Image (spheres, grey):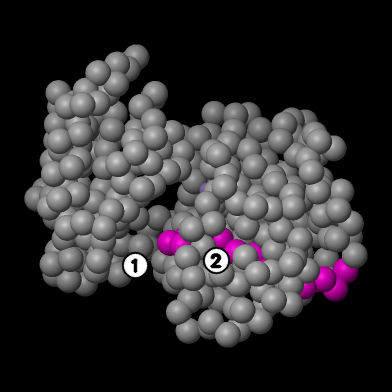
Amino acid sequence: MLIMSSIENSDGIKGFEKLQSLISASFGKIVIITHFNPDGDAIGSTLGLQMSLKKAGHTCHVIVPNDFPDFLKWLPGADEIITLPGNEEKIIQHIQSSDILFFVDFNDVRRMKGINEPVTQSQAFKVLIDHHPDPVVEVDCMLSDTNVSSSAELVYRFLQKTTLKDHMDREIALCLFVGIMTDTGCFSYNSSSPDTYFIVADLLCYGIDKDKIYYRIYDSFSSDRMRLLGFCLDKRMEYYPSHRTAMIWLSQKDQEKYNFQIGDSEGFVNYPLSIRGVRFSAFFIEKEDHVKVSFRSKGAFPVNTFSARHFNGGGHRNASGGEIYESLETALDLFRDLLPKYHDELIDYDE
Ligand SMILES: [Mn+2]
């Protein structure tokens, strides 16, 4: 039996009843928005939610602030996702005419980038479905739970609590499975709760092909990307064993050399954690006018706090991102200089 810890107790959630009634009435206009640089969870959870709402008779559009990686484009419904740039007017129209706005998989309005403004002006009923800590999003109904593996898991729980559960099918199960699988690194982190596996078991009952999904997501890289990874590990990784830390960086020149495509550096940040003893890893990638950073850790070291303090970011304790409007060299120097200051926290870890 599922232990629906989060939405199970929906009686206490402000606005939940109103949301239920809006969803039970058909032919509403709904927009679902996820974050800039969407990952597998962002796309999987929004598409799963969208399909359920459509099957319930609503008109529903998914809007994403920028393009997303090719390895997610085969998902059912992905070809109808509306992205920026290029659809500005359409996006404003959809947001203005919507009855409900769902925000999925982010905890800060700034992650909507260019979509933020029309959203602020909208009078629609606003709902957040997210698993990041300390949300700063103004909504009428907040379904936020940091204990779940992913937003896809939260969407599943949400569907179960409403009439939408009657519309569950193989395609919806597939999208939600992709969200859970990618946000847990194929069940290697954020996935110690039995509930996650009860949910996965139920999703598998809809006949999804788990192995095929795995290889369509993870075994779909270009040869350029594989060579880039090899190059990064050999020439762009810095290892600081005394701080139990390693990092990888990538300049714009490097990206050009390997014909860099969006999504190509996905997962690079995880590789240093495979070194014995390493508990903290970072990945720096140079963009046109800023440097984007990803952090991962094992155990107690909170990379979300670290990122918020020094790299304008946030996220989860063991997985976070940030950005800094400085040169790549300055960003790397900042990181290198910070390590000794965090030395005690970094080595204080139970094997
Ligand atoms: Mn997520």
Report the side of 233 relative to 149 (left or right): left
| Mark 1 neighbour density, 10 Å: few (under 14) some (14–19) many (20 or more) | few
Residue 79 screen position, x and y as percent: 55, 76
Left or right, 160 with respect to 202, comes to: right
Q: Secondary structure at mark 2?
A: helix
Q: Residue at x 84, y 60 (%)?
A: 23
Q: Is residue 125 left or right of residue 317?
A: right
Residue 109 image position (x, y, % from top left) = 54, 57
Quadrant where the N terminus lies?
top right
Q: Which residue is mark 1?
A: 262
Report the residue at 61% width, 55% height from top: 104
Q: Which residue is denoted by mark 2 in the rendering?
A: 116
Relative to the observer, which residue lies in front, 285 or 172?
Answer: 285
Span of residues in magenta: 26-38
Quadrant in the rendering for residue 163: bottom right
Q: Give the residue drawn at x 63%, y 38%.
A: 145
Please name the amino acid that badge 2 sits on.
Asn
Front-most of residues 350 and 182: 350
Give 221 or 304, whichever is nearer the viewer: 304
At label 1, the amino acid type is Ile
Query: Earlier along the polypeptide chain: callout 2 or callout 1?
Result: 2
Q: Dot 2: few (<14), some (14–19), or many (≥20) neighbours within 10 Å?
A: few
Q: Confirm or deny contact between disc 2 and disc 1 (CB under 8 A).
A: no
Instruction: Give the position of the C terminus as an image quadrant.
Output: top left
**Distance (Cα) linking label 2 and label 1:** 23 Å
Viewer can see residue 149 = no
* Quadrant in which residue 97 is drawn: bottom right
Q: Is residue 39 magenta?
A: no
Q: Is residue 267 above or below residue 92?
A: above
Q: Quick one: SS at disc 1?
A: loop
